[in-house]
Image: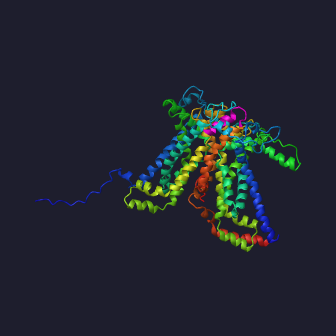
């Protein structure tokens, strides 16, 4: 092969390969986005003809899914009439769970990073937590919260904010520990020591000298954990019934409701659901891999 | 005679705000205080449920039994729950039971992770050299990871309809353009022999990007000197890959594979929205199996607990050795990971060139 042919063909081949793989990865998203703007008669193929692009663009799916306009079909015959309250429930539980995980996780991460608290075993145990399918502990949790609920007049039981927030906090707590631990390790020890020499207590040094140093990491961790909680389906599916239905659970109930395949509003809800994680994910791009690999891969 | 006052040193003043241990004298106390809330949380959400599960696994307890869970001893069944799960070899070929669910999960794990690794590696190699639009394209490949898994299930549910866009696109390609086949109507979700692969495909779509990003960051961190040396000495691309890139990247590949295997083993969300474990039992992976046995199709909490414990034991046996590399890597930067064995790699440059000379 002559050099000039190689220099032309190789980049061209590379671009072609990337475009092909890119199409595979973009098409499902393309289908979701366009579906959410299609009118009802274009959701499914008519006479074998598939609507690759919306013939007529409409916002009806969004207004129906979000409860701005009343649905024109029997759609959303499930318990909540539209996705407004499920989205609010998702926001509350995901935010609450993130706060719980952050407060507890940041302290533990600092203890492990700075003082090697818990020796070698504790980080190992925390890592182990991630290996087990959550379904394995969910029945006992259901039992626990059902029992708690009966003895607290329903305040802390199944189908409440508290149950979900606590479990979300516990499930994402390991992620906070790994991420924050790696951020704390990047802060020189001397900073805390200098603060203590200057008259701070250990706690003062932590809050006034160390935490400001990891502000960026803290924000990234918070967004990352929020994405995880926002994405949860299984835990909410088991631990809620009808009062605190989160958005993914609601999406599932539409799927299995047998009310026909109301693709349009479902796609609209799906699109609304993936916007926050997409935006946050892009904001914390640099730390995504670090988070998803338990802090093993630091870019 | 007057006793002279003894000069005593002024007593050190204790900080008033906190007790001594609290105020920051003893690092040990502080360390313990820092991790205590986390340990309590783990105790509440992990240790307690595990204890309850161990207890219930010996009983035939169901939520409809009519008594509280701690009275479950009234229906004590010893090991019959475990026995029922373990002897489910008999139901293996008919598709039901614990072992079949484990087997399916293993198939999903092995197939899914290998394709993700191959595809992610190929993509990463395409992205190493910088080109115009690289960072924008990287963002495109990031997007599937950010999709809520339940929504992934719904998206692929739409795509995989028999009259849906996947078959539509295949028809356009093979029927309209190449004239090879008739209209393509693959029953992606309704054929028991195909449905599991549809579930795997959805997972591949969602998680290949993570594989890609992990491997890309590894490739970018490779020490340039050795790569250049090999190139200048005339090693072919394949030999560069075989003798240089692969050995140096090995720790990263290992971590990527372990992490994806751990995660894919738990697969539930996308599978449930895509097929709900069906048709029949065809896509009932272990998480789906547990959910069906305890909540969706039946309420056998005693049996479910026994299966959960079996899963815990099996996963522990496989995974505890497997997480050592991850734990070790948490202490290292990515450059240390790929360049940690400098001396060996230099030898490999020589091997790459030698292999070249033999050709």
Q: Look at the image and tell me whether residue B320 can be seen.
A: no
Viewer-nearest residue: B168 or A195:
B168
Residue sticking out furthest to the bottom:
B233
Q: How is the image coloured?
A: rainbow
Magenta segment includes A249: yes
Image quadrant holding the C terminus of chain B, namely bottom right
Viewer-nearest residue: A166 or A12:
A12
Q: Which residues are magenta?
A: A246-262
Viewer-nearest residue: B76 or A7:
A7
Residue A37: give x, y in percent of width and height. 70, 42
Give the side of residue A200 with respect to residue A212, left or right: left
Q: Look at the image and tell me whether residue B348 can be seen.
A: yes
Residue at 73%, 58% in the rendered image: B122
Residue B178: give x, y in percent of width and height. 87, 50
Residue at 48%, 31% in the rendered image: A152
Residue sticking out furthest to the left:
B1
Image quadrant holding the N terminus of chain B, namely bottom left
Give the side of residue A104 with respect to residue B300, left or right: left
């Amino acid at each position: 092969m002559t050099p000039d042919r190689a220099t032309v063909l190789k980049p061209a081949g590379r671009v072609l390969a990337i475009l092909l793989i890119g199409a595979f990865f973009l098409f499902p998203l393309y289908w979701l986005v366009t579906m959410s703007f299609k009118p009802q008669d274009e959701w499914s193929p008519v006479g074998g003809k598939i609507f690759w692009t919306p013939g007529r663009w409409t916002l009806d799916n969004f207004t129906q899914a979000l409860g701005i306009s009343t649905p024109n079909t029997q759609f959303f015959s499930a318990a909540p009439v539209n996705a407004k309250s499920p989205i609010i429930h998702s926001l509350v539980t995901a935010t609450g769970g993130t706060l719980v995980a952050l407060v507890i996780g940041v302290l533990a991460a600092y203890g492990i990073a700075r003082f090697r608290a818990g020796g070698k075993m504790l980080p190992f145990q925390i890592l182990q937590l991630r290996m087990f399918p959550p379904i394995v502990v969910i029945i006992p949790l259901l039992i626990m919260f059902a029992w708690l609920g009966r003895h607290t007049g329903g305040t802390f039981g199944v189908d409440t904010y508290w149950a979900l927030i606590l479990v979300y906090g516990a499930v994402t707590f390991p992620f906070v520990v790994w991420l924050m631990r790696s951020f704390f390790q990047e802060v020189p020890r001397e900073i805390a020591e200098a603060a203590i020499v200057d008259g701070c207590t250990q706690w003062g040094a932590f809050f006034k000298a160390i935490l400001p140093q990891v502000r960026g990491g803290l924000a990234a961790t918070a967004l990352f954990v929020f994405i995880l909680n926002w994405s949860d389906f299984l835990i909410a599916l088991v631990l809620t019934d009808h009062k605190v239905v989160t958005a993914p659970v609601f999406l599932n109930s539409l799927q299995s409701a047998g009310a026909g395949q109301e693709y349009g509003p479902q796609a609209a809800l799906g699109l609304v659901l993936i916007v926050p994680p997409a935006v946050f994910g892009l904001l914390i791009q640099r730390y995504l891999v670090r988070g998803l690999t338990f802090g093993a891969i630091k870019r | 005679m007057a006793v002279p006052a003894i000069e005593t040193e002024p007593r050190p003043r204790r900080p008033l705000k906190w007790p001594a241990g609290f105020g920051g004298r003893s690092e040990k106390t502080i360390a313990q205080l820092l991790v205590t809330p986390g340990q309590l949380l783990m105790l509440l959400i992990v240790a307690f449920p595990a204890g309850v599960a161990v207890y219930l696994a010996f009983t035939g307890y169901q939520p409809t039994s009519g008594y509280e869970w701690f009275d479950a001893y009234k229906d004590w069944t010893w090991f019959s729950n475990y026995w029922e799960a373990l002897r489910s070899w008999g139901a293996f070929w008919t598709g039901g039971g614990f072992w079949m669910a484990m087997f399916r999960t293993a198939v999903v794990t092995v197939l899914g992770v290998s394709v993700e690794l191959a595809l992610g590696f190929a993509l990463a190699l395409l992205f190493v050299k910088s080109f115009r639009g690289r960072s924008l394209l990287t963002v495109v490949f990031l997007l599937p990871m950010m999709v809520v898994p339940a929504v992934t299930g719904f998206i692929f549910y739409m795509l995989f309809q028999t009259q849906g866009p996947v078959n539509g696109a295949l028809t356009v390609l093979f029927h309209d353009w190449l004239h090879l086949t008739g209209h393509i109507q693959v029953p992606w979700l309704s054929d028991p022999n195909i449905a599991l692969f549809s579930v795997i495909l959805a997972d591949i779509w969602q998680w290949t990007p993570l594989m890609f990003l992990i491997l890309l960051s590894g490739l970018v961190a490779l020490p340039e000197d050795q790569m250049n040396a090999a190139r200048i000495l005339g090693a072919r691309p394949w030999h560069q890959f075989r003798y240089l890139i692969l050995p140096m990247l090995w720790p990263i590949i290992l971590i990527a594979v372990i992490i994806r295997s751990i995660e894919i083993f738990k697969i539930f969300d996308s599978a449930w929205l895509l097929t709900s474990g069906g048709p029949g039992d065809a896509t009932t992976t272990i998480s789906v199996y547990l959910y069906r046995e305890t909540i969706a199709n039946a309420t056998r909490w005693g049996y479910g607990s026994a299966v959960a414990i079996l899963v815990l034991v099996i996963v522990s046996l496989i995974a505890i050795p497997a997480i050592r590399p991850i734990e070790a890597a948490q202490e290292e930067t990515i450059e240390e990971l790929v360049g940690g064995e400098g001396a060996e790699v230099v030898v490999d440059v020589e091997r790459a060139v030698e292999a070249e000379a033999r050709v």
